Amino acid sequence: MKKDIHPNYREVVFFDTSSDYKFITKSTIETSESIEWEDGKEYPLYKIEVSSNSHPFYTGKKMILDTAGRVEKFNRRYAKK
């Protein structure tokens, strides 16, 4: 393999902000934050809005995640008059 052309592949903590769920996996994603994990080591942190712990398909619960007012905008646009 050529040197210095491949991204940094390492363990990263992904934090689901909607359900306060954290999991660790390997990734090449670049982050500016870090967090101390349960094993005492420090890992890069990447915040996400939806994961398998909060997505309605995986949880079986109907949950509306409205981060930018998209639902209200849709209802206003297509509301029956």
Image (cartoon, rainbow, N blue to C red):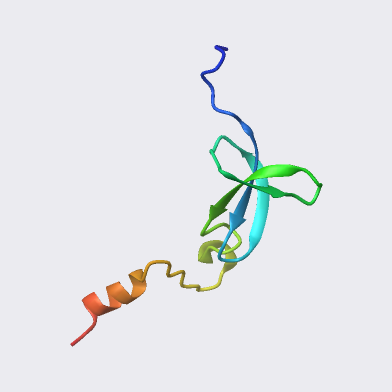
Image quarter where the N terminus lies is top right
Q: On the picture, is 24 further left or further right than 78?
A: right
Give the x, y percent position of residue 73: 29, 73
The correct choice, above or below, for 8 with respect to 65 in the image is above
Which residue is located at x 53 percent, y 63 percent? 55
Depth check, front residue: 43 or 64: 43
The correct choice, above or below, for 20 with respect to 46 in the image is below
Identify the residue at the far bottom of this view. 81
Give the x, y percent position of residue 57: 52, 63
Identify the residue at the far top of this view. 2
The correct choice, above or below, for 15 with respect to 74 in the image is above
Image quarter where the C terminus lies is bottom left
Depth check, front residue: 74 or 33: 33
Identify the residue at the far left of this view. 81
Q: On the picture, is 79 further left or further right than 62?
A: left
Give the x, y percent position of residue 5: 51, 19
Identify the residue at the far front of this view. 32
How many numbered marks does the figure carry?
A: 0
Q: Quadrant of residue 10?
A: top right
Which residue is located at x 69 percent, y 43 percent? 43
Give the x, y percent position of residue 68: 38, 67
Q: Quadrant of residue 51?
A: bottom right
Q: On the picture, is 40 further left or further right than 27?
A: right
Which residue is located at x 54 percent, y 22 percent? 6
